[in-house]
Image (tube, grey):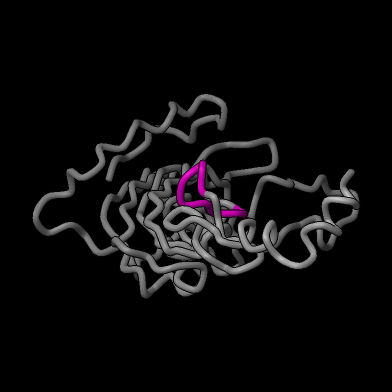
Amino acid sequence: MKVVDRLLDVDAVASFPEPRWGELGENPRDLSLVTVDLGALVSRSVVWRAAGLLRPETLEELSEAGTVAERIELHVEAQPVQREEGVRIRVRGACRTVIRLACVRCLIEFPLPIAATIDATYAVGVDPALKNKNWRIEEDVEFLPDGVLRLRHLVEEELLLALPMNPVCVSGCAGLCAGCGVDLNRNPCGCRASESSGPFAVLKALQSS
């Protein structure tokens, strides 16, 4: 934990360093249930840093999207900064894991490495704009009434946003045959052969001519 001499302007904060993935040691810290008291950071003007792992079972929504095959690695930093509206806490970092998803084309499960960059800003209390219509809304700030940031919620949100809308096992996946359902990546389809020699083959030929 590093003490800051003064509250820094939000634009003056140095960029978050590139995480050194996989270098957490033999007994990495379990961050699954770790919370950050943002009010304490503001009152003491300190930077809070942590690196460790989150257990997949603590991220319920992500587990519903797919099977999390590895623990989630997280590197994070929280720092109070000065803005025109007051002191805010900027949280930055990065997280990564591997999740097994079902391919939308062939329905086969495949492992997909996913990573997300974290850059969020928080404030302790309730948004003043809810009570004062003349107050400027801070669209990039999330207000936390209890001043407590739960790391697993932040990480889960970022990883869910990083998931592809239509996951595909490989870019050239041929998918399943709409007629017989065979996996075209593994076996040839017999639908065309049967159609070309069937009783309606002549009729289809006339319609296409």
Question: At 49% from the left edge and 31% from the top edge, which residue is drawn?
Answer: 8
Q: Picture coordinates of residue 148 (x, y %)?
A: 49, 65
The answer to which of 26 and 97 lies nearer the viewer is: 97
Q: Picture coordinates of residue 156 (x, y %)?
A: 48, 61
The answer to which of 32 and 105 lies nearer the viewer is: 105
Number of marks in the rendered image: 0
Q: Picture coordinates of residue 172 (x, y %)?
A: 51, 42
Q: Is residue 126 visible?
A: yes
Q: Is residue 101 magenta?
A: no
Question: At 60% from the left edge and 69% from the top edge, which residue is drawn?
Answer: 180
Q: Is residue 167 magenta?
A: yes
Q: Quadrant of the C terminus?
A: top right
Instruction: Residue 160: name its quadrant.
Output: bottom right
47 relative to 168 in the view: left or right: left
Q: Picture coordinates of residue 54 (x, y %)?
A: 32, 63
53 relative to 141 in the view: left or right: left
Q: Is residue 150 visible?
A: no
Instruction: Residue 146: name its quadrant.
Output: bottom right
Question: At 12% from the left edge and 50% from the top edge, which residue is drawn?
Answer: 25
* Residue stretch rendered in magenta on the structure: 165-173
101 relative to 192 in the view: left or right: left
Kindly report the secondary structure that dominates the magenta region of the rendered protein: loop
- The image shows residue 50, relative to residue 83, as above or below, that is below
208 relative to 63 in the view: left or right: right
Question: At 34% from the left edge and 51% from the top edge, which residue is drawn?
Answer: 74
The answer to which of 168 and 15 lies nearer the viewer is: 168
